[in-house]
Image (cartoon, rainbow, N blue to C red):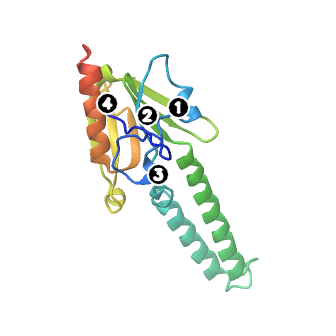
């Protein structure tokens, strides 16, 4: 896989056709990525989920919050309740804000990494969860697209490793998922199976 060479004002970029937030310079991988790498390991691609993930992954919670707010606002008409409509809507705004901030922090802490040896998924706000699988152990990759992802041109890359029979990891809400999937399968063919793997 080739990498764009840096010019005087432009760092090397990952060969990826998604939106700007989806690709990250590999000239100097982010600290969380660099700490995961072994000696001599080459980063082929670093992907962050699309920022659309913040809103799309919050839709269900925001719907529940809206329902609760309207129920509380309706209940505020009765004298026996201890709140007003304004307080109900204020509570709703507070809860919606907390949910969106939480999802934004989750988005910020997600990185998907493809190297010449493995795929890595790093996520977590307070407790970091790292999944990694050697390229020669990956049995199947798939592109999954929920309706909410399809509407915004997003998708999820799923990985199943040898001996599990289930999907072991997901790269969720990536821009241009078919291009990312193609890059992953090319790396598996070249470095995994091509190097005597499965």
Residue bearing mark 1: 33
| Residue at 28% across, 45% down | 179
194 in relation to 61, above or below: above
Q: In the displayed image of the protein, which residue is found farthest to the front? A: 8
Around disc 2, counting alpha carbons within 10 Å, would you say few (fewer than 14), some (14 to 19), or many (20 or more)?
Answer: many
Residue 163 showing in the rendered view: no
- Determine contact: label 1, label 2, CB under 8 Å: yes
Earlier in the chain: of badge 2 and badge 4, it is 2
Residue 34 falls in which quadrant of the image? top right
Quote the CA–CA distance across marks 1 and 4: 22 Å
Quote the CA–CA distance across marks 1 and 2: 8 Å
The N terminus, quarter of image: top left
Residue bearing mark 4: 160
Earlier in the chain: of badge 1 and badge 2, it is 1
SS at badge 3? helix
Residue bearing mark 2: 113
Picture disc at residue 147: none
Around disc 3, counting alpha carbons within 10 Å, would you say few (fewer than 14), some (14 to 19), or many (20 or more)?
Answer: few
Residue bearing mark 3: 21
């Amino acid at each position: 896989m080739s990498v764009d060479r840096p010019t005087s004002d432009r760092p090397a970029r990952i060969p990826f056709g998604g939106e700007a937030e989806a690709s990250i310079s590999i000239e100097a991988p982010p600290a969380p990525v660099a700490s995961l790498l072994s000696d001599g390991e080459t980063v082929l691609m670093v992907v962050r989920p699309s920022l659309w993930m913040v809103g799309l992954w919050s839709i269900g919670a925001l719907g529940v919050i809206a329902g609760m707010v309207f129920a509380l606002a309706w209940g505020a008409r009765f004298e026996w309740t201890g709140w007003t409509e304004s307080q109900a809507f204020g509570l709703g705004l507070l809860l919606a804000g907390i949910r969106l901030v939480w999802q934004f922090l989750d988005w910020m802490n997600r990185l998907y990494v493809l190297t010449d040896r493995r795929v890595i998924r790093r996520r977590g706000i307070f407790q970091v969860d790292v999944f990694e699988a050697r390229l020669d152990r990956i049995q199947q990759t798939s592109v999954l697209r929920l309706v909410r992802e399809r509407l915004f041109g997003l998708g999820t890359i799923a990985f199943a490793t040898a001996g599990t029979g289930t999907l072991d990891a997901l790269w969720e809400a990536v821009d241009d998922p078919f291009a990312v999937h193609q890059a992953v399968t090319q790396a598996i063919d070249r470095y995994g199976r091509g190097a005597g793997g499965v």
